[in-house]
Amino acid sequence: MNATAFTRFILNQKLLFCVLIIVAVGISMQQYNVRHIGNEAIFKISFYNLINHRDLYLGSEKFDGQALDLFKYSPTFALLYAPMAILPMPESMIAWNILNVILFFFAIKSLPFDGKKKSIVLWLCVLEIVTCVQNSQSNTLMAALLIFSFAAMEKKNILMATLCIVLSIYIKLFGAVALLLFFFYPNKPKFMAYTAMWFVVLFLLPLIAVPFNVLISNYREWGHILKGDESISWGLSIMGVLKPWIGAVISKPIMQTGAAIILLIPLISTKSYKNLQFRLLYLCSILIWVVTFNHKAESPSFIIAVAGMSIWMVTQELKPIYIALVVFAIAVTSLAHSDIIPRAFRDNYVDPYVIKGIPAFVLWVVIQTNIYLLAFKPHPLRMQDSTDVSQK
């Protein structure tokens, strides 16, 4: 097999689809066999707590003799988890992880660039997908929903775009940042109307299973859980990175507010909205922003940031410096908490200095700089396959 044939084979999307399914099934079975089923058990129990009108957020749950962490998702998520919850273990783990990887695969396929670049993005994300599957996490699904929302807007499918964003918010609140993408497209009143509609529909959806007063009580408790997390958590965010490096505690609200302002300023350049490259850069910035400035960022969260890094790399001019920067950033991000790194090195350096969180912030600064240059140059360069989106 010559190099050209090998490249075609490696970048074949059917091969990638099979790889992702094998990852989902194989790792789910492996994690079940070693009884690493905490998140799956939490999701499963949340559904039964909901339909039995119990408080979703009491904690102190156990499954198969294991003490479980708190459920930190919305009542809507607990209800929507029903198709997996009714399955026995390990089938529910397999179904959940397959759902995540399939949606991520098709989200990347929906992006407005060629198939070769999509395959590169998928390969660059494989290691982070493995991390998510190992933890039965929802972050691969979150990345898929945010990317689907962008692709749906590009295709003027406002109903689907707003559903993806609002659904992401009912899973993890940081999905709300993707609402900024609405600025780039016409029919903004329709965007707002559909967004409000989906918020109401998804808010009330658990009424299928619980009385109104129980639902409101659960939403109230969900708010208390999230507020408590905000006050005690630093995670792998840039705030968590800076703490050991500069030896001082940085105010999370100040850091997040400053980063939000930096993210918002390019929106002043309305002329840039017609530029596909600008819109793709902004999507990449959002995907990284929601991780690197998220006080709850954990290792499986970085599939979202790595997706942003990868999309940025393939949509830029393939300069060696860009390729080297992204490959190095993804390698550090994806391998920092892996077993490839000696345990002693992780314990003494990677974890204390929050190494995993550094590349995402560096790439966000680079991408945001690109956005500013594109937005505020007198005559910004246009992407070759850029498409115009008429503005109102």
Image (cartoon, rainbow, N blue to C red):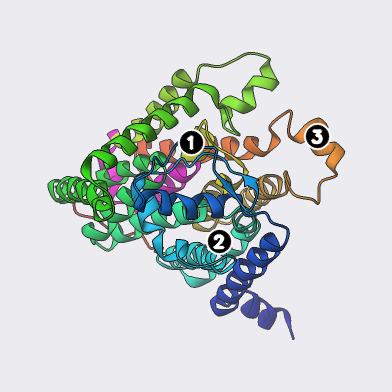
N-terminal-most mark, 3 or 2: 2
| Amino acid at pointer 3 | Asp
Q: Which one is closest to the eye, mark 1 or mark 3?
A: 3
Q: What element carries label 1?
A: helix
Residue shown at 38% from the left, 26% from the top: 261
Position of residue 167 in the picture relative to residue 294 (left or right): left
Pointer 1 residue: 369
Cα–Cα span, label 1 and label 3: 34 Å
The circle on residue 121 is 2
Q: Nearer the viewer, residue 320 or 87?
A: 87
Residue at image point 30% right, 43% down: 179
In this rendering, would 16 be left or right of 53?
Answer: right
Place residue 337 in its image quadrant: top right
| Mark 3, residue position | 347
Amino acid type of the residue tagged 2 in the rendering:
Val
Whether residue 135 is situated above or below residue 289 in the rendered picture? below
